[in-house]
Amino acid sequence: MKINILVSGTYGDIIPHIALARGLQSAGHDVKIAAGENFKNLVERYNIKFYGTSSDYERVMKTDR
């Protein structure tokens, strides 16, 4: 089965989804995570397919506004 996981948020939000994706891969599924481009290296480090989105909540949280 092909599974796409959409994650929006910060580092703490994406880590559980990486664990979920790895478990699904172990069960034989084809998994891709869609998240902010700032997480590309992190996701790919775990051999999970990645699709970048334009959201970067970590950058937003670091701004004064």
Image (tube, rainbow, N blue to C red):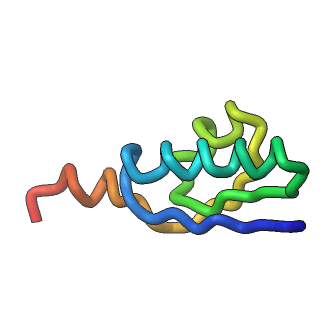
Q: Position of residue 25 (x, y in %)?
A: 81, 47
Q: Position of residue 21 (x, y in %)?
A: 68, 50
- Position of 26 relative to 37 (above/below): above
Q: Quadrant of residue 29?
A: bottom right
Outermost residue on the front side: it is 27
Q: Name the quarter where the C terminus is drawn.
A: bottom left
Q: Which sits in the foreground, 26 or 61?
A: 26
Q: Residue at x 76, y 51 (%)?
A: 24
Q: Residue at x 71, y 53 (%)?
A: 50
Q: Residue at x 58, y 37 (%)?
A: 42
Image side of residue 63 versus residue 33, left or right: left
Image side of residue 45 versus residue 59, left or right: right
Q: Which sits in the foreground, 44 or 4?
A: 4
- Position of 47 relative to 8 (above/below): above
Q: Residue at x 60, y 42 (%)?
A: 19
Q: Position of residue 45 (x, y in %)?
A: 68, 31
Q: Position of residue 63 (x, y in %)?
A: 17, 55
Outermost residue on the left side: it is 64
